[in-house]
Amino acid sequence: MIRRAIYPGSFDPVTNGHLDVIDRARKLFDEVIVGVAHNDQKHPLFSLEERLDLLKGALGKIRNVEIAPLDGLLVDFAIARRATAVIRGLRAISDFEFEFQMALMNRKLEATVETIFLMPKEEYTYLSSRIVKEIASLGGDISSFVPVCVAKALRRRFPR
């Protein structure tokens, strides 16, 4: 049986912290599906298609990683893709309460899908897409926080 996991997120934009969690997950599972969430209630900087392309650009052709759009309930997506686990990144204790609540709700909706929490390297614990976008919008250097393709996309979005 193939051990398959879903790593969901908005990835608006993908950061080096996200890439670190993907790398950790691919060492634990045979296949990792990076599910790029579409959420009408959020107003992302990048469109779903742009976020998919940025992830593809950042990851290249890494063995055992697939990038796919995610719409609807996460557990339904996991079942449809025959995944047995959901990967969630935890940067700090403040992330835990929300993530724990979501994990319990997902377990209630579908008991066969487990949630696995992974911590990124310490150097990425302060990093978030929101902070990266804010720094980029103010003309700051984000090159050490995101892949090259994302830094270029942010510079185009926030020209100085």
Image: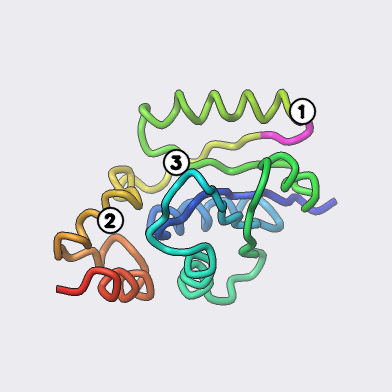
- Whether tag 3 and tag 1 are in contact, CB under 8 A, the answer is no
> What whole-number distance in Å separates the C-alpha atoms at marks 3 and 1?
23 Å
Q: Position of residue 143 (x, y in %)?
A: 25, 68
Pick the front one: 120 or 81: 81
Residue in the image at 14% along x and 73% along y: 160
Q: Who's the residue at 29% across and 60% down the image?
A: 145
Distance from the alpha carbon under mark 1 to that under mark 2: 35 Å
Q: Which residues fall within the magenta stretch?
A: 110-114
Query: What amino acid type should be assigned to the residue bearing mark 3?
Result: Met
The one of 109 and 19 positioned closer to us in this rendering: 109
The disc at residue 86 is none
Here the colouring is rainbow
Q: Residues within 10 Å of mark 2 (few under 14, many from 20)?
A: many
Quarter residue 159 falls in: bottom left
Magenta stretch, main secondary structure, is loop
Identify the residue under disc 1: 111
Does residue 158 belong to the magenta stretch?
no
- Residue at left 53%, top 55%? 22
Q: Secondary structure at mark 3?
A: loop
